Image (spheres, helix red, strand yellow):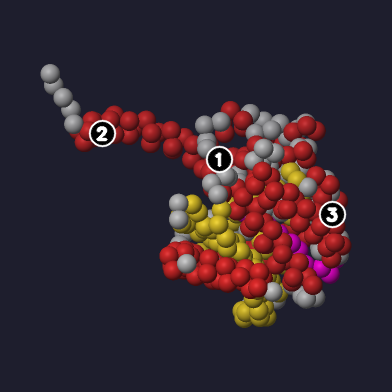
Amino acid sequence: MKTTNLAQALAIDSQLRLPGSAGRLLKQIRDIEHVAPLFRDAGLIKTVKRPSVVNLVVSGIASHSCIHRALGGFIYASAAVRTDLLIHDNKVSTTGSDSVSELDDIDFEAQRKRLDLVEIRHCYALVERLLAQGSAANLILIDTPLFIDRDMVPLKRNVRHWSEYEKTRDAIERFWQKHRQDLFPWNQDGPVLASILAERFSAIVSIARQDLRTEEGRKHILLADGFSSDSTAKLEGLEERLMGIGDTRFINGILGNFNRTIAFRMTENRSRMEPANEVGQGLIGFHFRSARSSQIKMAQLAGEESDWSAEQLDTVASRLMILDMQSQKKAMPLPQLLSRQQLQILEKFTAYYRQGLNDALRSNDVESTWLSGLDEGFES
């Protein structure tokens, strides 16, 4: 019986499939090159002006959590760091920083999702502290969603996860009820609070596949953000052409240097986000890219179409692109990048805490301290 080892099988298979794969990729590239100008003409892709002189006060918040095994269970550390920057006539300087953290043991139940909720609370806590200081920031950036996505809502029987969810939902609700009027666009002199997220491309890809000639097809986009209804006829039949193109390849193909997508509503299905009362006042987003080599990001902003103009959205996008920095193939705004660097200590500190916990239990220090206090209570 004749046999073929794996290396030979892969070599034969690659030779047979290479022409077909190359042909499909080339067709997709040609389709994207054909579609991109049509999207620009329709206003779905917008070029943002790059300012020559930058004057900006910005605060960037980055969050991170880590989990370590310890004593047959787990411990975690979660933290967020805020870095404040002043850019005056293109000269950059740091003006301050702040941080919050917590470290404790954690059971196995939905660990990562619970820590996602903790990170959201940390980001909001740092924003609130900044606003309490009377900061003159033009822009405040966080790296968690502004509101809780439906997929982060747990089942009620998951008691600990549900507890974290309720605490986070209540914290977000209190923040917006207290500070909405302090933020742009409700306060024209207030800072813009923006959430910067990566790789959530399904929204704009879904919009691209709609029939934008109909009211139903246009309900997700902000028409006031430069949409040209006169060019929608050219988009007819694009759905079939886009069908074989993956979301990532599509968005990378149509966004060039200093480009952003048209702003779109993220609240058409409001039951999918919490807290519902605050989400009901609007949430919009757009994708942006500062350079071809940069990672594409999505910005989330609170508000509705009536709250934002195309010029205001362009200003926010321009500032985000100016701040965009590349680090280990991941792009993020400069103040968040500086905050992220401070968070690198979290893993080492968690390991140090675990070692200290092991040592304390071995030497019985914790129990001895507790018992000594108990004895004093009985003696009195």
Q: Main secondary structure of the magenta part?
A: strand
How far across and how far down the image is residue 350, in percent?
Answer: 49, 64
Which element is circle 3 on?
A: helix
Q: Is residue 80 left or right of residue 190?
A: left
The front one of 184 and 256 is 184
Q: Earlier in the sequence, mark 1 or mark 2?
A: 2
At 55% across and 49% down in the image, what residue appears? 107
Element class at badge 2: helix
> According to the image, label 3 marks what residue?
307
Does residue 196 show up magenta in the picture? yes
Residue under numbered circle 1: 247
Q: Amino acid at mark 3?
A: Asp
* Residue 353 against residue 37 in the figure, above or below: below
Task: List x then y, in percent, for residue 305.
Answer: 82, 49
Alpha carbon distance from label 1 to label 2: 28 Å
Amino acid marked by disc 2: Leu
Camera-side residue of 63 and 361: 361
- Quadrant for the C terminus in the image: bottom right
Q: Which residues are magenta?
A: 188-197
Residue at 21 percent of width and 36 percent of height: 7
Tag 1's secondary structure? helix
Tell me the amino acid under the disc marked 1. Answer: Asp
The residue lying furthest to the left in this view is 1
As drawn, which residue projects farthest toward the front? 379
Residue 154 percent across, percent down from the top left: 66, 41
Crowd class of label 3 (few under 14; some 14 to 19; many from 20; radius 10 Å): few
Q: Is residue 105 magenta?
A: no
Label 2 CA crowd tier, 10 Å (few <14, some 14–19, many 20+): few
| Of pointers 1 and 3, the one earlier in the residue sequence | 1
The alpha-carbon separation of the residues under discs 1 and 3 comes to 29 Å
Decide: is 288 above or below 325: above
On residue 10, the disc is 2
